[in-house]
Image: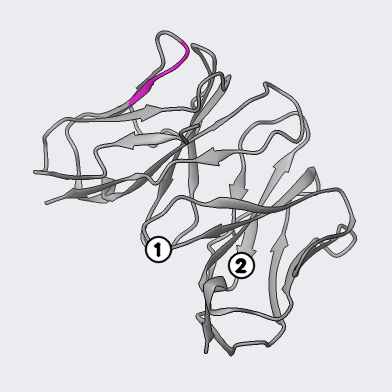
Amino acid sequence: QKEVEQDPGPLSVPEGAIVSLNCTYSNSAFQYFMWYRQYSRKGPELLMYTYSSGNKEDGRFTAQVDKSSKYISLFIRDSQPSDSATYLCASRIRGAQKLVFGQGTRLTINP
Amino acid sequence: GAGVSQSPRYKVAKRGQDVALRCDPISGHVSLFWYQQALGQGPEFLTYFQNEAQLDKSGLPSDRFFAERPEGSVSTLKIQRTQQEDSAVYLCASSLAMGTGNSPLHFGNGTRLTVT
């Protein structure tokens, strides 16, 4: 079993919809949680970063971490075709350097 | 300023050949990482440098994989006697800080290695 599990999709929604992307993790020592967006043939780029539990909002994006259930979520409001990409969740132990990534969810926003 | 630069962008190697993949991190970034991303999968950690010191190489899949960063800037990932299972995108990432919690990683666009 991978330390970070993510449904690979694909997920296809109409423009303007609210998108919910989720991951679960198994390592209780994870303290830092990130969402990366990866366009085709590009490297991942950091979207959201949270420490421990709670919510964080940035524009149309909201990240949630529930450490009691080991659940990570990313919500995208008013989705746009330009949001079409693969979304990767990632976690890290405090004091460690390496990120552990989920498999990635491929998202398509249809105009 | 330029981002993380990787070369070549694409590499085709015959099985058994050696390959060298180059990473130019963002200037001044202390930390440098290599990740391997198989098709349809998330990146998997290979190794980590803090300046020129290789502090973690636990993700290197075999002794055919070797990474170096001799002057604390440019890094090279070398794969000897390539095998088909080495086919993947190799991503390099750098970050400004060392050992602190929230310095974000900046990824390059990767080198796509195909072993035939």
Quadrant of the rendering where the N terminus of chain A is positioned: bottom right
Residue at point 74%, 78% (across, down) = A77
Q: Magenta stretch containing residue A71, yes or no? A: no
Q: Provide the residue designation for mark 1.
A: A40
In which quarter of the view is residue B28 placed?
top right
Which residues lie in the magenta part? B72-76
Q: As drawn, which residue projects farthest toward the front?
A: B1
Query: Circle 2 — which element?
Result: strand
Q: Provide the residue designation for mark 2.
A: A6
Magenta segment, prevailing SS (helix, strand or loop) = loop
Q: Is residue A35 above or below residue A110?
A: above
Query: Circle 1 — which element?
Result: loop
The numbered mark at residue B102 is none
Residue count near mark 2 (Cα–Cα under 10 Å), binned few <14, some 14–19, many ≥20: many
Residue at point 61%, 67% (across, down) = A6
Q: Position of residue A106 (x, y in %)?
A: 51, 73
Amino acid at pointer 1: Ser
Residue at point 41%, 65% (across, down) = B40
Q: Is residue A8 shown to the viewer in this render?
A: no
